[in-house]
Amino acid sequence: MQYAVGMSITEAKGTALPAVVDAGAVTEFTDDVDVLVVGFGIAGGCAAVDAARAGARVLVLERGADAGGTTRMAGGHFYLGGGTAVQQATGHEDSAQEMEKYLTAVSPDPEPAKIHAYCVDSVEHFNWLEALGLNFERSYFPGKAVIQPNTEGLMFTGNEKVWPFKDMATPAPRGHKVPKPGDTGGASMVIDLLQTELERLGVEVRYETGARNLVVDADRVVGVRWKTTDGEGYIRAGSVIIAAGGFVMNPEMVAEHVPQMAEKPFVLGSTYDDGLGIRMGASVGAALKHMDSAFVTAPVYPPSILLTGIIVNKDGKRFVTEDSYHSRTSGFVMDQPDSAAFLIVDEAHLQRPEMPLAPFIDGWETVEEMEQDLGIPAGNLVATLSRYNEYAAKGEDPDFHKGVEFLAAQDTGPWAAFDMSLGKAVYAGFTIGGMATSVDGEVLDVAGAAIPGLYAAGACAANLAQDGKGYASGTQLGEGSYFGRRAGRHAAAARAAVNG
Ligand SMILES: Cc1cc2nc3c(=O)[nH]c(=O)nc-3n(C[C@H](O)[C@H](O)[C@H](O)COP(=O)(O)OP(=O)(O)OC[C@H]3O[C@@H](n4cnc5c(N)ncnc54)[C@H](O)[C@@H]3O)c2cc1C
């Protein structure tokens, strides 16, 4: 492949692809390393650690003044299983096979080699994280929540107990949380540990230095052009690992790929989630996958008693099993006419949501009045609710197979409605798509061939997370760290082979 040569460099903004630089035209390289890691979040940090441990000369470029990117914002769930020490200590049986069945079932476009590797290596990866200094508490939170309320090490964070998946793989809790309470910021401790380890390994992290363009020699990526506030230059590298995060903070890319996210949802990300890493990959022919997918959510639980109610669209029809993981429910809301939906509960099951993201609309003495005020065609909601109530009273849900613990007839008026509609509820989210990669993080072109010298990991790569409906909390940190490590080791081995 012959790349366009661009030595008159203008910075690529919006959806523009950065120019590709021909190595032959570069007069001086500031550095020459085996493995150059672009971005120090969970993926880049883990890639750098395993590349350095494998003996490679590693340099990390980080655009921010500190490491961590979006990872520092994360609550700190890692999706791990197959019999981790926390699962064992809390009496939860799991196996790599059941985990693999589950992850395959929730993926719209499963990549079997990646899912298999992730599951069979999950215990080893858990141990690797603990050896880094992360001590997951040997405790379990049994409730249904968005995140553990305290420092409990384990809970269900996906749709393992939710139909149809509960019939496809034996459910096990796999949401391992770092020992720091709170919805956000917990994963910061992982970044601190990675910084300490990189220092111990003698790996330089160059802050406030952004990679801007890839440098190629014929069909091989051999380095980057970098830029700081007061300088620029070129680095030569045996391999470049792009771990530069997603694109939720780039409005043009979001509008092009995920229009539903462009206006109403609140974007969850850090400043440099502008998709530059993805565009750098695309500039040398990387195939991009799942670019139209997003994790978008507005959880209506906790308290989980609210899930005993029903969720209906503006036709008064149910469309999702209400005990789904919150981003699965939200994904189905997005598919409804006008992305409109209501959560309906009776007085006996009404409690105040802990996070008031879906606004309370009102209460009504009769279901007939409620459906009229909500603009639902006459009779539809009455019919839906009475069918639900009839079966719920028997502990059954023939339509959506909701878990028995969430089945309760909503037959004690008055009835309340919460607005889950896009534009009314406070939805927030991040993008999911990125560069196509092999199981070892090699970036693939549209024909499926590895682009020599180029790797990607984390939110700029397409791996296990494929859409919000199948997402489980912990997938991003889990896959970013695991596939980051694989990319680091593969890049180090490739360089060792070249060096003899
Ligand atoms: C509020 C919140 C909570 C979340 N909670 C969880 C959770 O509990 N579990 C989970 O699995 N996921 C969670 N996520 C998602 C998860 O945090 C991210 O998907 C993940 O951290 C991405 O990691 P990364 O290494 O790919 O990117 P980042 O952590 O964003 O790191 C990328 C780094 O690259 C740098 N960079 C960008 N461009 C360049 C460049 N050109 N040159 C050099 N450096 C560059 C950035 O500055 C950044 O430091 C959460 C997200 C949010 C917003």
Image (tube, rainbow, N blue to C red):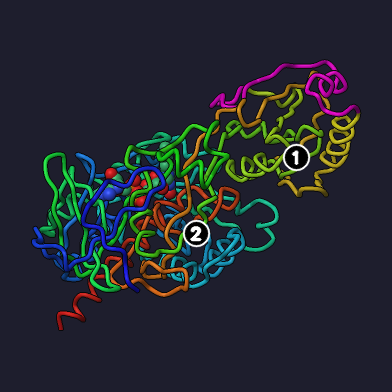
Q: Amino acid at mark 1?
A: Leu
Q: Position of residue 277 (x, y in %)?
A: 33, 53
Q: Position of residue 132 (x, y in %)?
A: 25, 55
User: How many neighbours does mark 2 have within 10 angstroms: few (below 14), some (14-19), or many (20 or more)?
Assistant: some
The residue singled out by tag 2 in the image is: 289
**Residue at x 78%, y 23% (from the top left corner):** 374
The front one of 57 and 167 is 57
Position of residue 47 relative to residue 161, above or below, is: below
**Residue at x 72%, y 16% (from the top left corner):** 362
The magenta-colored residue range is: 352-378
Left or right of 321 in this view: 265:
left
Which of the image's four quarters has the N terminus? bottom left
Q: Are marks 2 and 1 in contact (CB under 8 Å)?
A: no
Q: Amino acid at mark 2?
A: Lys
**Residue at x 18%, y 42% (from the top left corner):** 208
Left or right of 3 in this view: 436:
right
Element carrying mark 1: loop
The front one of 332 and 11 is 11
Q: Residue furthest front?
A: 8
Task: Residue 335: name its quadrant.
Answer: top right
The total number of labels drawn is: 2
> For residue 357: magenta?
yes
Q: Which mark is residue 219?
A: none
Query: Can see residue 475?
Result: yes
Position of residue 482 relative to residue 391, above or below, is: below
The residue singled out by tag 1 in the image is: 407
Is ligand 1 within 8 Å of the beta carbon of the residue shown at mark 1? no
Task: Residue 172: name its quadrant.
Answer: bottom right
The front one of 469 and 224 is 224
User: How many neighbours does mark 1 have within 10 angstroms: few (below 14), some (14-19), or many (20 or more)?
Assistant: many
Left or right of 155 in this view: 240:
left
